[in-house]
Image: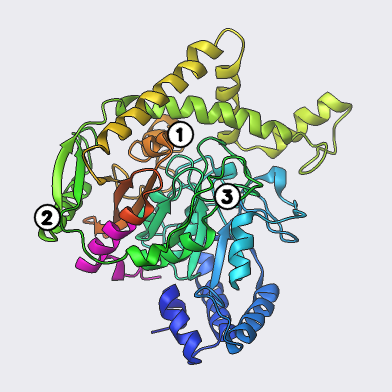
């Protein structure tokens, strides 16, 4: 097996025994990127020189016997994480030359483990999108079928795993932006509980919804990555001071007696037939493993998309007000006076989808409409949270599809924003509730496109969904298939 095919735990064993060096692994990954990147477009910025230096440092650390399981592992970050001295664009023209003076906590924690940073990954602009088509740096393509989207907004993060361009990646999830691309690209993607991973140094889209999480080849790697980045951070006011368990210890393979909820609102008419069949097989697999099933109801699911697109756009309107051409980012050279400079800088710097969401959010927050839209959305959000709270009184995990269809064609929904927004119908409620969920490979469509299974857990119940996902993974072979690219 080529080095770039290995999982974190496989490569760690090779590094620990000396069969492979981190320098060799990094060179192999950079060669792989060079080979497939023209076909995929996963990266915005590559950092080969610093990556090789970090690999040499990792080899010295391994030789000294002080290696962490992530020491020497080549990975990449969604271009929403601030990285000191390395360009961070958030997929936008307005930040096309921004080099931050400090780093995100999540990257600092990975760097302290001895990880090697290969570069920064493509994404929808300011994480606003479900297809990775709104990036100012070009479209990322799905390695399983390069005429199709990889999902969004963390499309580059998932595509890089599917194309074997990184051993692991980090993404962010505001309404499904880790789980949906992981599903479309045949990867494992985990959205942790809100507050479990620090958001410090992550460029904000919607501050009450954004959460950092890993995208990996298998569930074991996901547990390793989550363990490295999770934990309290005093620099993030929403970070929760709660102990971080050993997530890998939860991977027992045993789900006997686990109560799995099947929400009737998620198994609906109109669900793609291949997705339906994959869910049915997954339920059958869990039944063979000894899990128990309970039909549940999440009655406010129908209101989730509307609620999300009021709250998220309102928060985006506030967060993106800082991009005015004054302190950092793009400044229009043609402006005459302060107001003209701000107007032209934002007009030139933001793409169509970002402008659309800023306008929606500004309208929802405006005088006379605030109570009718934003306040009402917050009340409905409370009802959605209550649905999950009641459901978890009777079940341990909730099983649903990740997306209503497999990956669609590039350009298929760009002229119909509502249809694009509806592609996140099964992932959005989790962000509104603030709980955790993960996508696990669960099958393929008739066209050979990956389909993901969503496992939703209680707040801070990552151990349970990792255990359930790992058991399913061990009983199936979906995660072993590779995109031919």
Disc 3 is placed on an element classified as loop
Horizontal and vertical percent position of residue 117? 61, 68
Residue annotated with mark 3: 198
The figure's colour scheme reads: rainbow
Q: Nearer the viewer, mark 1 or mark 2?
A: 2
Q: Which residues are magenta?
A: 466-485
Which of the two labelled residues, at mark 1 and mark 2, occupies the earlier sequence position? 2
Which of the two labelled residues, at mark 2 and mark 3, occupies the earlier sequence position? 3
Q: Determine crowd level at label 1: few under 14, some 14-19, many 20+ residues with C-alpha closer than 10 A.
A: few
The answer to whether residue 218 is visible is no
Horizontal and vertical percent position of residue 205? 58, 38
The answer to whether residue 252 is visible is yes
Q: Work out whether residue 151 or residue 298 is closer to the camera in this orientation and state it.
A: 298
Relative to 322, is 403 on the left or the right? Answer: left
Residue annotated with mark 2: 287
Relative vertical location of residue 26 with respect to residue 402 in this rendering, above or below: below
Which quarter of the figure is the C terminus placed in?
bottom left
Disc 1 is placed on an element classified as loop
């Amino acid at each position: 097996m080529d080095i770039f095919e290995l999982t974190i735990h496989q490569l760690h064993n090779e590094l620990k025994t000396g069969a492979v060096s981190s320098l060799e692994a990094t060179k192999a990954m950079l060669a792989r990127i060079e080979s497939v990147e023209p076909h995929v477009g996963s990266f915005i910025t590559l950092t080969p020189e610093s990556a090789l230096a970090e690999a040499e440092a990792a080899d010295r650390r391994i030789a000294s016997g002080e290696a962490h399981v992530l020491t020497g592992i080549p990975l990449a970050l969604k271009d929403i994480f601030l990285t000191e001295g390395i360009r961070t664009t958030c997929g936008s023209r307005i930040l096309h030359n921004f080099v931050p003076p400090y780093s995100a906590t999540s990257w600092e924690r990975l760097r302290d483990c001895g990880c090697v940073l290969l570069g920064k990954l493509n994404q929808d602009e300011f994480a606003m999108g479900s297809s990775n088509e709104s990036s100012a740096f070009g479209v990322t393509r799905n390695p399983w079928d390069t005429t199709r989207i990889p999902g969004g907004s963390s499309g580059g993060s998932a595509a890089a795993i599917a194309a074997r361009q990184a051993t692991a990646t980090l993404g962010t999830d505001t309404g499904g932006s880790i789980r949906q691309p992981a599903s479309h690209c045949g990867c494992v993607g985990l959205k942790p509980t809100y507050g479990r991973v620090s958001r410090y140094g992550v460029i904000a889209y919607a501050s009450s919804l954004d959460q950092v999480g890993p995208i990996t080849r298998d569930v074991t790697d996901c547990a390793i990555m989550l363990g490295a980045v999770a934990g309290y951070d005093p620099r993030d006011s929403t970070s929760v001071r709660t102990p971080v368990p050993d997530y890998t210890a939860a991977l027992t393979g045993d789900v006997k007696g686990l109560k799995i909820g099947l929400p009737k609102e998620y198994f609906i008419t109109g669900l793609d037939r291949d997705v339906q069949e994959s869910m049915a097989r997954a339920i059958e697999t869990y039944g063979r493993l000894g899990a128990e099933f309970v039909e549940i109801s999440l009655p406010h699911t129908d209101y989730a998309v509307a609620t999300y697109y009021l709250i998220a756009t309102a928060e985006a309107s506030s967060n993106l007000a800082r991009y005015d051409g004054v302190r950092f980012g793009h400044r229009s050279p043609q402006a005459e006076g302060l107001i003209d400079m701000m107007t032209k800088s934002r007009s030139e710097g933001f793409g169509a989808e970002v402008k659309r969401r800023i306008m929606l959010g500004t309208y929802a927050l405006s005088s006379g409409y605030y109570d009718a839209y934003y306040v009402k959305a917050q009340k409905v959000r409370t009802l959605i949270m209550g649905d999950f709270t009641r459901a978890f009184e009777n079940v341990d995990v909730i099983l649903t599809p990740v997306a209503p269809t497999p990956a669609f064609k590039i350009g298929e929904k760009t002229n119909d924003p509502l249809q694009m927004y509806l592609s996140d119908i099964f992932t959005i409620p989790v962000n509104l509730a603030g709980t955790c969920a993960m996508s696990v490979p669960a099958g393929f469509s008739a066209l050979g496109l990956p389909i993901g299974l969503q496992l939703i857990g209680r707040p801070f119940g990552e151990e349970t969904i990792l255990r359930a996902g790992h058991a399913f993974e061990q009983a199936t072979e979906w995660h072993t298939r590779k995109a031919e690219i």
